[in-house]
Image (cartoon, rainbow, N blue to C red):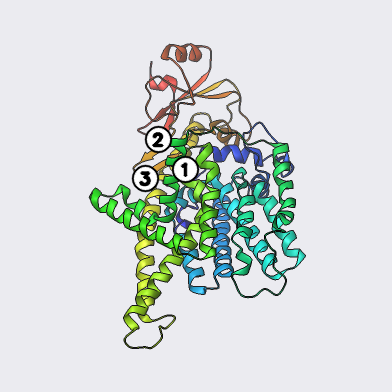
Amino acid sequence: MALYTGSITNYFQSDDFILLKWASGGMRSALIPSPWEFYRPCVLFIFSLIYKIFSASPIAFRLTAIIFQLSNCILLSLFAFEITRNKTLSMVSAILFACTFYHSEVMLWISCFADILLTFFCILTLLSYHIYCHRGGLRWYMLSLIWFCCAIFSKETAFPLFFILAAYHIFAIDRVSSPPRAPSLTACCAPAMLIPFLAPLCLYLFFKAPTGMINPPGKIAVNYTQYILYGFVPFLTTYTHLRCPAIIKIGALLSASGGMGLLFVRSSKQTKFLAASFLLFISLPAICTVAEARYLFFPGCFSSIILATAFVRFSDYLGGKFTQPIAAARPPSSPISVITLITICLAAIIPQVLFVFERAKDWASASATAESIIESVREVEPYSLAGADTYFVNLPDGIPSRLGYAYIFRNGIVEALYFAYGGRVGKIEAVRMAGAQGTWRGHGEIAREALKKLSRRGASIFVYSPDTHGVKKYERVGP
């Protein structure tokens, strides 16, 4: 929580305003399909609830995201303990997951709340299903089905969760922990138990069929490689923006990859299940869209447990080597093991934490620019924008940096002004001039002569000023 509390006061950005506009229609509107390409009623229901209580307060929305992420870390620790029966490993898994650098965009951008909520329901699904398979009890099966429904209707990328449940039976996870108190499910009856989970998938397709491109095989391979590197060697990939000899980067990457490969080959059924689950869940974004760090949010649960397993095993192995001449049997937690584990965790976490802090600066700057644009409009037109058509010229897409991109007004300017003026707005359109830098290509181009004609017809024209990070009336800018 300490990583992201500094961003609580950030303003809304880009798509945030679109979601707010939809949520302002009430909780019932969250369930109705819309022209928007996504159908995420669970996310919009929670947004509507927050809006009903706190109105358009950025603090309320950001604090909700942080609370859900804290819950995700606790649930991940419980799930890791359920399948490994190792308290140390479960705690390390949660810490690694909390500090992962590729979570920064999701945590710093309100529009990505769907990934946080998806992770919350997916972990609950796996945890409930594991308890049912391991201990019995129809209520746990029903709970897992309910959480599965919530995950599907939180974000469409939850579809592979069905295959992860199937992989659970393939790797016989219910038989690797302590003896169950109820008869465990066998592989032959697994298909029958998974049939009810197909109903939410079909229901979602009834409301909204997912759309997306299919990448060529080469692009899919590149996406998979990038996801695997981010997921299993995040402490190395964060160094890519630092000045470091290429040979050191390559050597460290090959060493880490070899170690992870050895871990997979000589791993337990739990680790193989986690690795398979990671690969299954990233398959949809790898095949259908571009590689984005936010798609790793839930798969990061699996990679965090695998990394924690590697860290704990290595520290115990090293501690055992040092203590072997003194003790006849290796102690479960020698001082050497503890020191080694803490050192490895710090080496993995510190560069990622530094990365998150740097990214937070980018998003804070983008947030301040978005707020400055809205406030500069209010200074010129304090009461209403309903009197004439309004055009915004050269609005910045976002703030690019060596670490990524922080959005400003790629979208959402219409909805932002709707909230700023309490609905007293008319036609609003964002356009860009040919050759303008830092603008989004999705905004239609407009010539200077066309701007002059619109101005003579009485349209209100605002031009973005990089010097003030706000907008100025066209007449004040000059011809």
Q: Which residue is mark 2?
A: 469
Residue at image x 54%, y 34%? 412
| Structural distance between the alpha carbons of marks 2 and 1 | 28 Å
Question: Farthest residue toward the right?
Answer: 138
Residue at image x 64%, y 54%? 166
Residue kind at label 3, given as amino acid type: Leu
Query: Is disc 2 in contact with disc 3, using a CB cutoff of under 8 Å?
Result: no
Question: Nearer the N terminus, badge 2 or badge 1?
Answer: 1
Residue kind at label 2, given as amino acid type: His
The mark closer to the camera, 2 or 3, is 3
Task: Return the x and y of residue 170 as percentages of the image width and height.
Answer: 61, 58
Query: Is disc 2 in contact with disc 1, using a CB cutoff of under 8 Å?
Result: no
Viewer can see residue 244: no
**Viewer-proximal residue among 146 and 175:** 175
Viewer can see residue 137: yes
Q: How many marks?
A: 3
Residue 425 falls in image quadrant = top right
Residue 433 falls in image quadrant = top left
Residue kind at label 1, given as amino acid type: Glu
Question: Nearer the N terminus, badge 1 or badge 3?
Answer: 1
Q: Is residue 445 left or right of residue 148?
A: left
Up/down of 349 relative to 114, above or below: below
Q: Which residue is mark 1?
A: 292
Mark 3 lies on a secondary structure that is loop
Q: Which residue is mark 3?
A: 403
| Badge 2 density bin: few <14, some 14–19, many ≥20, Cα 10 Å | some
Up/down of 423 relative to 435, above or below: below
